[in-house]
Amino acid sequence: MVNNENKLNDLFNLVKNEPVQLSLEETKEQFTQSVNSIGKAGGKLAHSINLKLIGMITILSVLAVTAVIYGSSNENELEKNVKISTVILEGNNDSIKAIEETEKVIQDYYIEIIEEQKAEDSNKVELTVIEDNVKELPEKELVANIEKQIRNVQRFFDEPYRFPKLTETEVKANNKQKAKMLKRLLKFSGKNFGFTYIPSGEYETTSVQGYFVQQTEVTNLEYRTFLFDLLIQDRKDEFLIAQPNQTLWTTEYPGGFNQPMQGAYFSHPAYNEYPVVAISRKGAELYCKWYSEEFLKKYKTKVKYPNSYKLRLPLEIEWKVAAQAGESSRKFGFNGESITNETDCYLANFNPERNADADGGLYTVKVSSYNPNPLGLYCMSGNAAEMVYYQNPDGTLTPGTKGGSWNSIEKELEINGVDRWKGRTEPSVNIGFRMVMTYSRFSR
């Protein structure tokens, strides 16, 4: 008991010395601005907000992260520390859930990295570039170093027409990540390939040539690697077209308390494996083009059919065939005809009627979340609505999306569901993408 009290005293002293990230008045003002409609489905924030609660929210982020930094070797003790905010905020509304959601993602990330560092070398744990660069640091320094690198990432997007030069370390780290991405395409096989083959056939009276479809949505880490490579190559015009508009987290949902998402979603490595959103269709197409070109620059002489490596956005029919996974009557892009399983657990990330986060996520979740469909494709329904092109009878193409998003109702998640973003080419925090590539042995 005495030992626990000493640890808590040390923890509190550490918190006191941390710089204030957001003043009490700033926090209060943000909550006041969010009073009318909050959260994923536009719920209402109570008109009376306890000042003490606002003060607690102001320091929660520091408190929770410090608890993780403290690095207790006892798992139960650590869990108690990082759950402090949940206990304090229990019973409050969606604005509180929004803060908790962001905190939890970041807390879980630090816990995971610390545990991976403790694992034996024989486990060969593969870390992302940022993690790899700081893996030998003590826990407190690790977190501080990652936070510094986050600020370095954010500086590229704070002022749209300034192009800070990447440091030698940043260039090296980005090139390392890019090399990993390109190597995945070297073979049309293997568990790390990341694509599933769909054979040629007649689908809904439409003849479809064989193609590969990406097993997950494109992630923040992958897209960030692409953006930084554009800067390394001095392709600034393309960078401006492709960069995400993270302010959409607040402007697209002005009544929601989404400031934590705006600040952390694209920059913090805790969100590396989450789907990239808030990018334009032109940006997604530039990513596909960049991936194809960079792969062929490096591996063209090592592959049999180089013209097969032309990555692009899928046609609607291609997306549907992949989602159906061989069953034309399939309702959703996952296994099962109901949105829940036999134990009443949700099988996709969307906006349930009972609670915005009852499905396991208030916003997006990792791209490999939930069970995949029989073809090994994840999140074909929900998470991020995925960019496609509808083929018109006259041969023209109309932009649209399929699968619904984290903020969609159940009907929008259906394979033949209504597309509320049909015709949209501008960014949205609801919209991401996955790639396909046509496979032809005769294209040389």
Image (spheres, helix red, strand yellow):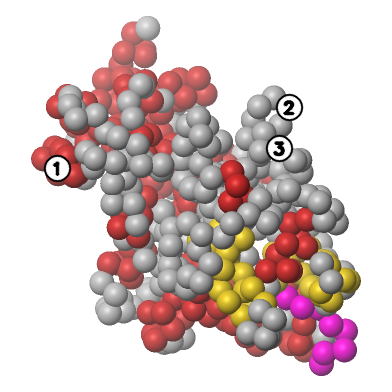
406 vs 210, left or right, is left
Task: Judge by depth and name the residue closer to the eye, 239 or 174.
Answer: 239
Residues shaded magenta: 437-444
Residue, disc 2: 342
* SS assignment for the magenta stretch, majority: loop
Q: CA distance from mark 1 to mark 2?
A: 45 Å
Picture layout, residue 220 above or below residue 95: below
- Which of the two discs, 3 and 1, labels the residue nearer the N terminus? 1
Is 59 inside the magenta-drawn segment? no
Task: Judge by depth and name the residue closer to the eye, 255 or 286.
Answer: 255
Which numbered dot is residue 338? 3
Provide the secondary structure element on which disc 1 rests: helix
Is 440 inside the magenta-drawn segment? yes
Q: Amino acid at mark 1?
A: Glu
The residue mark sitting in front, 1 or 2, is 2
Q: Mark 3 Cα within 10 Å, few/some/many (few <14, many 20+)? A: some
377 vs 268, left or right, is right
Q: Amino acid at mark 3?
A: Ser
Quarter occupied by residue 188: bottom right
Q: Are marks 2 and 3 in contact (CB under 8 Å)?
A: no
* x, y percent for residue 323: 74, 57
